[in-house]
Image (tube, rainbow, N blue to C red):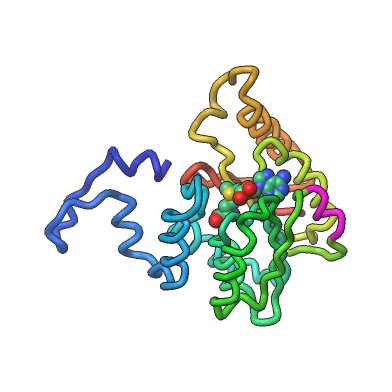
Amino acid sequence: MIIGLRNKIRINYALLGKIMTIEEYILAHIEPEPELLRQLNRQTHQKIINPRMLSGHLQGRILKMLTQMCQARTILELGTFTGYSALCFAEGLPDDGVLHTVEENDELEDFARDFFHRSEYGHKIVQHIGKALDVIQTLDCEFDLVFLDADKREYTDYYRAVFDKLKAGGYLLADNTLWDGKVLHTPDPRDAQTIALQAFNNLVATDPRVETVILPLRDGLTVIRKK
Ligand SMILES: C[S@@+](CC[C@H](N)C(=O)[O-])C[C@H]1O[C@@H](n2cnc3c(N)ncnc32)[C@H](O)[C@@H]1O
């Protein structure tokens, strides 16, 4: 995993004359993090608990590029947090595209909305406050792309709830599906998140209606294509 390599592999990047980690090397050779996202990243780390939940520079650029690659026009995100990934999806959408993003924690609403208002892509974002499974029922539209990043214990429920709203040929992304490698082992019976992620991974691997790959990016990003 890239995150696992971060602290283990150090390379001598001779042109810069200094030692870099693989992750630093990657970040130095991809599209830079936009200034507003850099500020959002920093303020999340200063003001919000569990800031590591935010997607960050590399994953954010990947989410934007995947949006462009599949030419998505309508996206559903479950788990807004402070809005980092939402702004990356919005950046990849065409100007008349729409991202619906859902967050249950209303204490994050103003923080994320402030950044959406400051962004040139903010007009594409529709913010929903509520439980993901409740909000999904209220959305009367079809999606080209769905991103699961809310409660890991509910991934299987999210998958079932959104499946009919995902267009044929559309994509579903699920974050954290390797769960720090814990999915490899028999979990403690009290570890509901690992148990649920194993069930989700088994479900999508055996569902004949989809094609599935897992990218070993950060904590695991599953890419699912609906046939
Ligand atoms: C990992 S964070 C999302 C990070 C964000 N997508 C990003 O990349 O910057 C997960 C978020 O899901 C929210 N969440 C958890 N359970 C939820 C639920 N049942 N419905 C909606 N949001 C939920 C949490 O409050 C948290 O803000």
Q: Is residue 182 magenta?
A: no
Identified at 40% across, 45% down, the residue is 2
Note whether residue 129 is visible: yes
Note whether residue 211 is visible: no
* Closer to the camera in the image, 112 or 79: 112
Task: Please provide the residue range marked out in magenta.
Answer: 133-138
In which quadrant will I find the N terminus?
A: top left
Numbered marks: total: 0
Residue 178's x, y, as percent? 54, 37
Q: Residue furthest left?
A: 17
Identified at 86% across, 54% down, the residue is 137
Q: Which secondary structure type mostly characterizes the magenta part of the structure?
A: helix
Q: Quadrant of residue 194?
A: top right
Left or right of residue 13: residue 32: right
* Closer to the camera in the image, 191 or 110: 110
Vertical placement of 23 versus 203: above or below? below
Identified at 54% across, 26% down, the residue is 184
Left or right of residue 140: residue 70: left
* Closer to the camera in the image, 138 or 147: 138
Left or right of residue 7: residue 125: right
Residue 43's x, y, as percent? 44, 61
Residue 65's x, y, as percent? 53, 66
In which quadrant will I find the C terminus?
A: bottom right
Vertical placement of 52 versus 40: above or below? above
Identified at 57% across, 68% down, the residue is 87
Vertical placement of 35 versus 160: above or below? below
Vertical placement of 35 versus 201: above or below? below
